[in-house]
Image: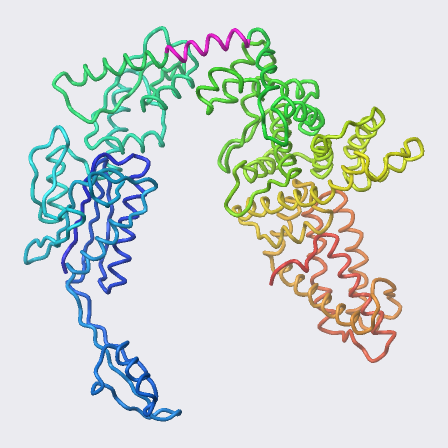
Amino acid sequence: MPDLLIELFSEEIPARMQVRAAEDLKKRMTDGMVEAGLTYGGAQAFSTPRRLVLAVEGLLAASPMVREERKGPKVGAPEKAIEGFLRGAGVAREDLEERDTPKGKVFFATIEKPGRPAADIVAEVLDHTIRNFPWPKSMRWGAGSLRWVRPLHSVLCVLTSEEGTETVPLDIDGVTTSNTTQGHRFMGGASFAVAGFDDYEAKLKRDKVILDAAERADHIWQDATNMAFAAGLEVVEDKGLLAEVSGLVEWPVVLMGEIGEEFLGLPPEVLQTSMKEHQKFFSVKNPNTGRIERFITVSNIETADNGATILAGNRKVLSARLADAKFFWENDLRVAKAGMGEWLEKLDNVTFERQLGTQAARIERIARLARSLAPITGADPEMAEQAARVAKADLSSEMVYEFPELQGLMGRYYAEEAGLPTAVAKACEEHYSPLGPSDDVPEGAVSRAVALADKLDLLTGFWAIDEKPTGSKDPFALRRAALGVIRIILTGDLRLKLDSFIDAHLVLHKIGLNQVKATTGEIDTLEEVIEEISDHGVFGAAFQAVLERLTSDAPDTSDGSLLGAVGSAVPDISADLLGFFHDRLKVHLRDQGLRHDVIDACLELDGGDDLNMLVKRAEALGAFLKTEDGDNLLQGYKRAANILAQAEEKDGVEYSFGADVKFAETDEEKALFSALDTGDTEIEAAMQAENYAAAMGGMARLRAPIDAFFEAVQVNAENEVLRRNRLNLLSRIRRICLRVADLSKLEG
């Protein structure tokens, strides 16, 4: 069984494309060969800046012969039909065989396709792969029509077996396959021939090329950390930068340089970001002070002066970059120390979203919402509002304009320079968090209030203009915002009725979107609507209550008014957004092992806008259902519910009350009455106290009497009085269980 080696050698491939391209080469080649009947034992893909490599072990020497029987037309069919079958099958008339079938005699053809040599199949698949390779961006060069990410110089393609090495012949727009390649661009020697993968990898390393990207990354990290350790420093870990740099060099040479003294006073994050984004340098910090003092660069060449000239050039370029950062920092400090008012004024002219207005308008909404949320997070309302008003001021700063990824972080520095409280400065940095499922959530009470307000304003705003995520598209990261709200609530153990805050904030958005010149009376009316919503939490009821109270004094507050327009639009939007939160919650809890149907069962009780309570109830129910009592009680409930549903449909009535123990005949029936009396009180008290474990304990104690009842009692008795009484008894089982969750939503 031969081994296959392919190398596609070109000008430098962008680092971000290399790993994906290597996997694409592997998948397209192996899929194509297997489809053609050429199976293999194993395959590996590699990439360097100048080459994509595929090594396949245990390849078949040839595809097997394929024998196929094909059914044709009936004997005696029109001649044209038979001729068409002969052409399609590729056989002669004398090769046909007549066979008896239940539908009469039918022609059959036996088609034999001989196996093909591996070299022929590999050449065919490789030609198709190269010509149709899925580069994100590609180019043409010279007079040819071939497209590749960068000009393709050579293709190595060999099959190696015990008999020797065979070059697979192929010509692709003038690029002819061979068994030769070359090493490092500067330190390598002449082209060399290879006889298999092991020989290829060894000769590449001799010519200063490390083929494996993981090996290059390990080499870089080891040398970098050793250099830093020797100087009493440590390298700031950055896996993304390490992966990128390992794709920029074929022979990594690690060098450590010093940062100019005049730049050491810059915030470490500024130094780190500037060096990473502009120069692809690793930052080296003093572990005692946290200050960035040196940098690590990775060269692609060894020099006689051990990199001194390279470092000198890098320091010169870095100094120019850091001089810009220092200029931005000093200018920003001047504005920050003056209170950041200049930046906030600029936000009046910065559009957040065409329909949702400016950043300044958004800040006003967030500040209002943060103040309302402060008591829930345990923050001081004044401080929460203050933090919300300055949290986005750094968007106008020169540093954030240059490095947008530093937004929030620079806000903390500037807030500290402005002399604002520590909690306010911390909120400036943390209110964007969490940025992903593994990102930390804000810790401080003020930070949580502002973070929740920021995300709720984002979500309600885009729901108000009907710009919701669709499929895989989520350009405004609304799924991430909803998950952030969920994680902040759950991590902080916050009791937050989402419905009231969603409704009140949707009103604010709809006021702006209606663009109506409201009279003074209408503005007062809208303020009262928002206040009423915050108190009661149900938009429809709150809206009606305020509308009715004001109708006598303001008869024009009716259909066509701003209040009427807002009131008619909000409830459906609010319900849809709350459903979006529930979908995100299911995904979040599913990752933690909680079934989606358990969440659905708990959602039915009160609308599910208190996510913290909902999760605690769902966790208790999920744990209960894993026990034998829980599983059996669920079956008992479903049996009771099914019998009830059938009886109610048949009789045309609802059996929901009237069960009386005096009509009980058996001991099991009487015992169930007693158990339901006790359980009803116990479960109701536990649910009121939000002691869900106790409620599940009360449910567990119902399991045995319910099982015994169904074992001993015939519900649909011939005596109509007994039948109605027992059906009403089943209704009590259903009603008590529904106090905990809608068990009909549970699977199994």
In the image, residue 382 sits, relative to residue 17, either above or below, namely above
Task: Give whichever of 260, 380 is nearer the camera.
Answer: 260
Figure disc tally: 0
Q: Is residue 155 left or right of residue 373?
A: left
Q: Quadrant of the C terminus?
A: bottom right
- The image quarter in which residue 213 lies: top left
Write down the quadrant of residue 611 in the picture: top right
- In the foreground, 70 or 651: 70
In this picture, which residue range is highlighted in magenta?
323-336
* 194 is within the stretch colored magenta: no
Residue at (67, 23) in percent of width and height: 364
Q: Is residue 622 left or right of residue 130?
A: right
Q: Position of residue 344 (x, y in %)?
A: 60, 16
In the displayed structure image, the side of residue 394 where residue 372 appears, left or right: right
Looking at the magenta stretch, what is its main secondary structure? Answer: helix
* Residue at x 14% of width, y 60% of height: 1
Above or below: residue 107 compared with residue 687: below
User: In x, y percent, where is residue 13?
Assistant: 26, 36
Residue at the farthest right position: 552
Judging from the image, the colouring scheme is rainbow
Q: Is residue 335 above or below residue 553?
A: above
Q: Against 21, is 104 above or below? A: below
Please provide percent x and percent y for residue 43: 24, 52
The residue at the point 64 percent across, 38 percent down is: 465
Q: Residue at x 31, y 84 (%)?
A: 80
Corner quadrant of residue 346: top right
Position of residue 610 measured from the top left corner of the image (x, y, whole percent): 69, 40
